Image (spheres, rainbow, N blue to C red):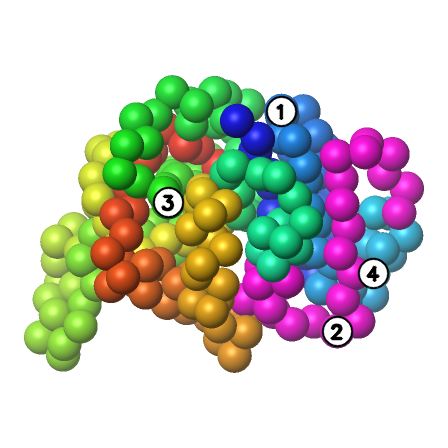
């Protein structure tokens, strides 16, 4: 299996250095980094990387996470021979055994997975948890505020969900290639991943939340 990491960065060079350091330790076939018009020395530092797995895509302006992930996704689908693509930001990275854990998952019927993102204290990051059921009415929204557990999976239990986070998503390259229109640049940095995952769900794709796919953010 060929795994590609897709990382989007904007003006967080300190965090990016750690993310790249940890990513280079893993057995990715390619590491695509989208520099979203950074002005903090990111481009000069990226140019100094000698690992041939690293591919840097430089944008002239900040297109947001949505624009960066779309640019990277298009490049991967058009230019690279990859099987699975791992999405994450410049302040996150997979745990050392995440790729091994992914290789051992039963992937039958699933072409997209949502991992568990933890903070430095080892606690799940709420903003990166997927929805097991998306609130689609006022009543649902009120109930979600009172009983979030009815809409969000337990952190330690695998289950099918309806959305993803772009920190910790793993998607098959073939599915990504046919779903690029679901990455809406107009959403910039808010709800772009929620929209993407929900559109996949509406199209009939099964999304598996797999807490063994660990990411640190």
What whole-number distance in Å separates the C-alpha atoms at marks 3 and 4? 34 Å
Query: Tag 2: Cα neighbours inside 10 Å, few (<14), some, or many (≥20)?
Result: few
Residue topped by disc 3: 112
- At x 43%, y 67%, the residue is 182
Q: Nearer the viewer, mark 2 or mark 3?
A: 3
Classify residue 143 as left or right of residue 31. left
Residue 61 magenta-drawn? yes
What whole-number distance in Å separates the C-alpha atoms at marks 2 and 3? 29 Å
Marks 3/1 in contact by CB < 8 Å: the verdict is no
Q: Is residue 52 above or below residue 177?
A: above
Residue topped by disc 2: 61
Q: Is residue 119 above or below residue 151?
A: above
Counting from the top left corner in percent of width and height, residue 107 is at: 32, 31
Classify residue 31 as left or right of residue 103. right
Earlier-in-chain disc, 3 versus 1: 1
Describe the element under mark 2 as helix, strand or loop. loop
């Amino acid at each position: 299996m060929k795994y590609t990491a897709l990382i989007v960065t904007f003006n967080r060079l300190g965090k990016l250095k750690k993310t790249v350091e940890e990513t280079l330790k893993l057995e990715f076939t390619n590491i695509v980094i989208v520099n979203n018009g950074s002005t903090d020395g990111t481009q000069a530092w990226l140019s100094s990387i000698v690992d041939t797995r690293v591919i840097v895509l430089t944008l002239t302006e900040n297109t947001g996470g949505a624009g960066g992930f779309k640019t990277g996704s298009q490049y991967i689908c058009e230019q690279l021979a990859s099987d699975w693509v791992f999405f994450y930001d410049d302040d996150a990275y997979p745990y050392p055994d995440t790729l091994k854990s992914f290789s051992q998952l039963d992937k039958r019927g699933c072409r997209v997975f949502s991992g568990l993102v933890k903070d430095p204290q080892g606690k799940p990051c709420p903003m990166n948890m997927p929805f097991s059921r998306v609130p689609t009415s006022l009543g649902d929204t009120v109930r979600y505020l009172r009983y979030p557990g009815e809409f969000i999976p337990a952190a330690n239990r695998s289950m099918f969900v309806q959305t993803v986070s772009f920190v910790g998503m793993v998607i098959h390259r073939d599915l990504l290639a046919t779903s690029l229109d679901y990455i809406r640049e107009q959403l910039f940095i808010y709800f772009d991943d929620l929209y993407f995952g929900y559109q996949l769900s509406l199209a009939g794709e099964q999304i598996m939340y797999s807490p063994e796919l660990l990411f640190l953010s």
